[in-house]
Amino acid sequence: MLNHLLAPLRALLARLRNWVLARLGKPRGAWIEGSVAVARGRLGFAPWAGNARPYRLYLPPGVEAGRPAPLWLWLHGCRQSPESFATGTRIARAADQAGALVLLPRQLRRANPFRCWNWFDRPTQQGRGEAAIVIGMIEAVAAGYAIDPQRVYVAGLSAGAALAAVLASCYPEHFAAVAMHSGVAYGAAQSPLVARAAISQGSSLDGEASAAMARLFAKSDLPVPALVVHGTADEAVPPLHAPQVVAHFLALNRRGDEPVAPDTQLGEDGGRRYTATTWRQGGRLLARQVLIDQLGHAWSGGDDSEEYHDSAGPDATRLILAFFQSDGRRAGP
């Protein structure tokens, strides 16, 4: 009887809490922790790292209602954590507005001393290793919550962007679209020894060659529209990588001999100029590149209280989510 009488009060307090948090610009949902182990998840160069990784999952208010929700896979960069990446990109606040779940895998120091995702690991580039572990995380979340399989998206920064490229290339059936901020192309390096040189000099593979490599391991041939964001002043991952990432996804996504023509627009937002180029084939989106003037190796428009985030615009989180919601292969939320 007492619980029955207190239920309306609890509901009122919950609504009041959400209203206060919204007014303060704070996330209103809940974070939970998890971990996934996958038999095919061991690294080729560091098998001692094991086949499991932890993750954080953000649940926006109302997700318990059971209506299928979008899932945003958010991959942090080197020297970052899920906590710092979520804070810097303000992704939880955006998830509240969209009713989306956010999955943030956590890299371990025993797998990489700088907490980079091992995009250069050969098994990972073949869809095993850390790629298989992250896919296992998606499947675990989908088993526990009502996820719309047509609205699963992946984005990442730096090494996280490079792993996002691997995931979209090897598991295109899982993703409606991919976004890479300050990353390198699929197949740019196939070992830790080559990775550093590839980052400074670029990939030795052109777009056709890297796409052909990806097709050897891909589970399907579905296209995955790609957004590539890069700063022109990035010294850690030079901007020469942006056109290489674009070339890879143009080769993967285009169909037939119909011409692919770029459309370029100039803009200014948040104190910075940018150049946005979009490639379509017969009206179908293949890729978009956004080059941001004077931006270094940092998430554009982020919370600069966190390392590798720059408060000047444009807001990369907003750009990416707009791309997901309006330009992905499947309808956005």
Image (cartoon, helix red, strand yellow):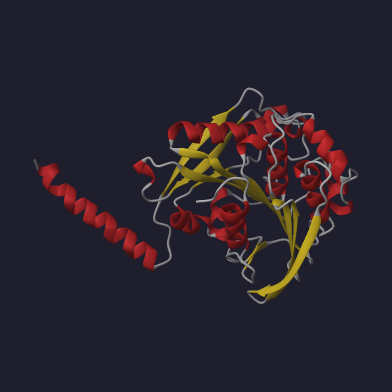
Q: Position of residue 120 (x, y in %)?
A: 78, 39
As drawn, the residue found furthest toward the top would be 39
Residue 190 in view of the camera = no
Coordinates of residue 42 in the picture (x, y in percent): 69, 27
Q: Which residue is drawn at 59% across and 52% down?
A: 324
Q: How many labels does the image show?
A: 0
Q: In which quarter of the image is residue 130?
A: top right
Q: Is residue 232 above or below residue 226?
A: below
Residue drawn at the location 77% of the way across and 63% of the way down: 263
Q: In this view, does 147 lie to the left or right of 63?
A: right
Viewed as shown, does residue 250 lie left or right of 15?
Answer: right
Residue 65 rendering spot, x and y as whole percentages: 34, 43
Q: Along the line of sight, which residue is nearer the eye, 7 or 45?
A: 7
Q: Quadrant of residue 313?
A: bottom right
Residue appearing at x 59%, y 49% in the figure = 81
In the current view of this chain or complex, which residue is farthest to the left? 1
179 relative to 272, above or below: above
| Residue located at (81% from left, 41% from top) | 256
Relative to residue 15, is residue 163 depicted above or below?
above
Q: Position of residue 146 (x, y in %)?
A: 43, 37
Look at the image and tell me in which quarter the N terminus lies.
top left
Corner quadrant of residue 13? bottom left
Q: 227 or 293: nearer the eye?
A: 227
Tell me if residue 215 comes above or below residue 158 in the rendering: above
Q: Quick check: can you spot residue 51?
A: yes
